[in-house]
Image: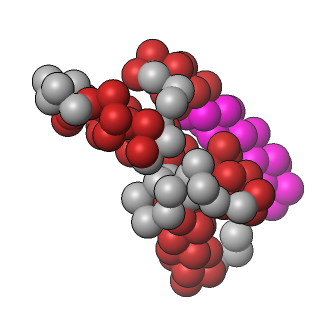
Amino acid sequence: MWGSLVQTENNATISAIVYMMVSALGAGQFVNIGSSGFFVKLIANISPVRYAVERVFRRIVSKSPFSHPLVTVFSFTLGDWECAKVLALMSFTFWVTGWILMVYKSNRF
């Protein structure tokens, strides 16, 4: 999908790197989402990286007796199944958007 939004390979690479950096900011890896401002919470809600990080983190600490305090400290409160549903919906949405953009650009030239 990303490659169909920009004109050249260099622009696609640069913009994808910027997007991933902003997504990682809202993923809860660098900033605690619960104690963050509005902008970081907004990024966290639209970032697919946030849901993937929460799901992986929950699986890593699932056998630990301290799993509940660890999960709440990082504000990972959605749960494994909710993260899986959001990731599946985002994947489908990105796939459909990429397909539509690809068909639109191929008909335009």
Q: Is residue 13 left or right of residue 90?
A: left
Image location of residue 94, percent across then percent down = 63, 40
Nearer to the camera, 39 or 21? 39
Nearer to the camera, 87 or 108? 87
Nearer to the camera, 33 or 92? 33
Quarter of image, res 92: top right
Q: Which residues are magenta?
A: 90-109
Asked if residue 36 lies in the magenta stretch, the reply is no
Name the image quarter holding the C terminus.
Answer: bottom right
Q: Does residue 59 sit above or below 94 in this rendering?
A: above
- Magenta region, main secondary structure: helix
Residue at horizontal 76 percent and vertical 58 percent from the top? 38
The residue lying furthest to the top in this view is 81
Q: State whether residue 91 appears in this view.
A: yes
Residue at horizontal 70 percent and vertical 70 percent from the top? 6
Query: How is the protein colored in the picture?
Result: secondary structure
Image location of residue 100, percent across then percent down = 75, 39
**Badge count:** 0
Asked if residue 97 lies in the magenta stretch, the reply is yes
Q: Is residue 23 left or right of residue 69?
A: right
Image location of residue 58, percent across then percent down = 31, 31
Q: Does residue 63 sit above or below 21 in this rendering?
A: above
Residue at horizontal 67 percent and vertical 33 percent from the top? 93
Q: State whether residue 16 appears in this view.
A: no
Residue at horizontal 41 percent and vertical 22 percent from the top? 80
